[in-house]
Amino acid sequence: MSDRSERNLGWALCAPAAIVMLAVTAYPIAHAVHLSLRRSDLRFPNAARFIGLDNYATVLASPYWWHALWVTVLITAVSVAVELVLGMALALVMHRTIRGRGMVRTAVLVPYAIVTVVAAFGWAYAWTPGIGYLAALLPAGGAPLTDTWPALAVITLAEVWKTTPFMALLLLAGLALVPPGLLNAARMDGASAWERFRRVTLPLMKPAILVALLFRTLDAFRVFDSIYVLTQGSHGTGSVSILGYDNLFTALNLGVGSAISVLIVLCVAVISLVFIKLFGTAAPGSAGGEGGR
Amino acid sequence: MIAPTRRQRLGWGVANVLVILWALFPVWWIVALSFKAPAEIGTDGGALWPRAWTLRNYAGIFETTEFTRALLNSIGIAAISTAIAVVLATMAAYAVARLRFPGKRLLIGLSLLIAMFPQISLVSPLFDIERHLGIFDTWVGLIVPYMTFSLPLGIYILSAFFREIPWELERAARMDGATPFQAFRRVIVPLAAPGIFTTAILVFIFCWNDFLFAISLTSTTRARTVPAAIAFFTGSSQFEQPIGSIAAAAVVITVPVVLFVLLFQRRIVSGLTSGAVKG
């Protein structure tokens, strides 16, 4: 095949996917930007007009936005940190297991693959006094889902349970790339298990860890399902996704809702940029990570 | 490697049991809940085993169309989205893995970007767009936004799979006298099929899982999928919480997921991780 026909075939095969992806994301986002610059209240459809950045001013001046952002950052930071530690432990267990390896991996995949809403209802009932086994462990009268901090803890726990397996599997794949010979050599040199992990395994796993952290951080930042089921965002537990949803479907304000949408995109862009800085050359898709293909 | 001592082996064995319990216990409790009689729920202090097993909750949800219709919507929407995404992703991933052309890295980067996109940001504009196009509260109205995650996921996983395929075998078959179609049919299809199949399962699970689009872009049972329908379940009287029905519906939509995981564990694991490790 000549270079030119190869190039054309490549483009032709990628075009449908690329066009669909752009149509379903770029177009709505452009529309969101457009809506966010207008007064667009579904209760007063005839009063729609261009108002510049007023919707953004409304959102940024609102304590609800900042509280939701704080809640989102908190849930994201805590759950991703806990998941990294637990996921690493889980990955080490799966890596060392020889007998029953398939069984452990199958069991671990269940929380990951289960519908988030189903898991969230499970946790909601488990923590409801009188109904659940976890509430039964609490002192009488405790109802964790009706108080900000306990509710946030329950939400974070639900997230951690659901997504630690994904973290663990990514880390496990990273562990498999650590050459056993290197670990044995370190052992011969008298390095303790902790030293081997700290000095040999961890540095070699850095790219896998960063990829896992990036995926999970961006995913955790859009937390919605668990909160919707567990608290509906009440008692100050709403994330930015919950806030955007409420603005659209409870306050019926498309303009403000769209401004929130755009602001969330900006937050995600900032997080991604930070990670790309951290990655350096190890970024997925960059020359170093792709084996030069 | 140095053979582990008996104590070490015991330690890892205990760790395994803990991991399995941690992963499956919460799921088991929902199953137990779904088999409890309404009178038992709320009075048994969250027992881990139903006192008297009953199928009443399951009979209840299959009596009305609220759940059966949602189940049909879930299956139909997830299946169609998966089919479209896998076909388009296969074409793109084949090109990425096998052909040399500029812009290939851009495509992978673009799909990663889109896969990680905050879905709530698409909800407000899509709500407006879909009402104008008249596809709000229809199957199409959900299949369209499902492309935002299913297509990038498909491209990402498939291009990692396709990179592992020994494509030289095709040329070898041609040298041995196979026609291009025979080489494709007998050599390439069997090599590519497992990757495509695994991708389809993963994409299906993601579509099956969606909640945000499903509650935002539907308003009736016409296109509402099960996760959204569960959230709107009402008890048979306003004083009765539909806990048993929700638990039963939850178990029903968990069954296919658990089956996939049981049957294809190894493939799902490699599908989830291959792209991330090899870039």
Image (cartoon, coloured by chain):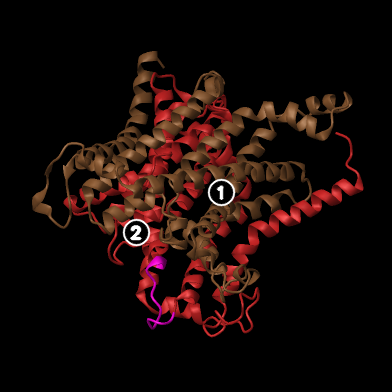
Q: Colour of chain A?
A: brown
Judge whether residue B37 is colored magenta: no
Q: Residues within 10 Å of mark 1 (few under 14, many from 20)?
A: many
In red, which chain?
A: B
Q: Tell me where the magenta segment starts and ends, as one range.
A: B230-240
Q: Is residue B138 visible?
A: no
For label 2, the residue is B215
- Residue A140 image point, x, y percent: 61, 74
Residue at point 34% right, 21% down?
A8
- Which residue is found at the position 50% from the left and 72% from the top? B248
Residue A14 in the figure: left or right of residue A200: left
- Disc ID at residue B160: none
Q: Quadrant of residue B91?
A: top left
Q: Which mark is residue A163?
A: 1
- Chain designation of label 2: B
Q: Residues within 10 Å of mark 2 (few under 14, many from 20)?
A: many
- Residue type at mark 2 is Ile
Q: Nearer the viewer, residue B218 or A40?
A: A40
Q: B89 above or below A129?
A: above
Point 31% across, 47% down: residue: A62
Residue A141 coordinates in the image, percent (x, y): 57, 73
Quarter of the image holding residue A111? bottom right
**Amino acid found under the numbered disc labelled 1:** Thr
Secondary structure character of the magenta stretch overall: loop
Image quadrant occupied by the N terminus of chain A: top left
Res. A167 in view:
yes
User: Horizontal and vertical percent for residue A219?
Assistant: 47, 43
Furthest-left residue in this view: A46
Q: Element under label 2?
A: helix
- Which residue is rendered at x = 48% and y = 52% of the image? B205
State the residue lying farthest toward the right.
Answer: B6
B175 or A167: nearer the eye? A167
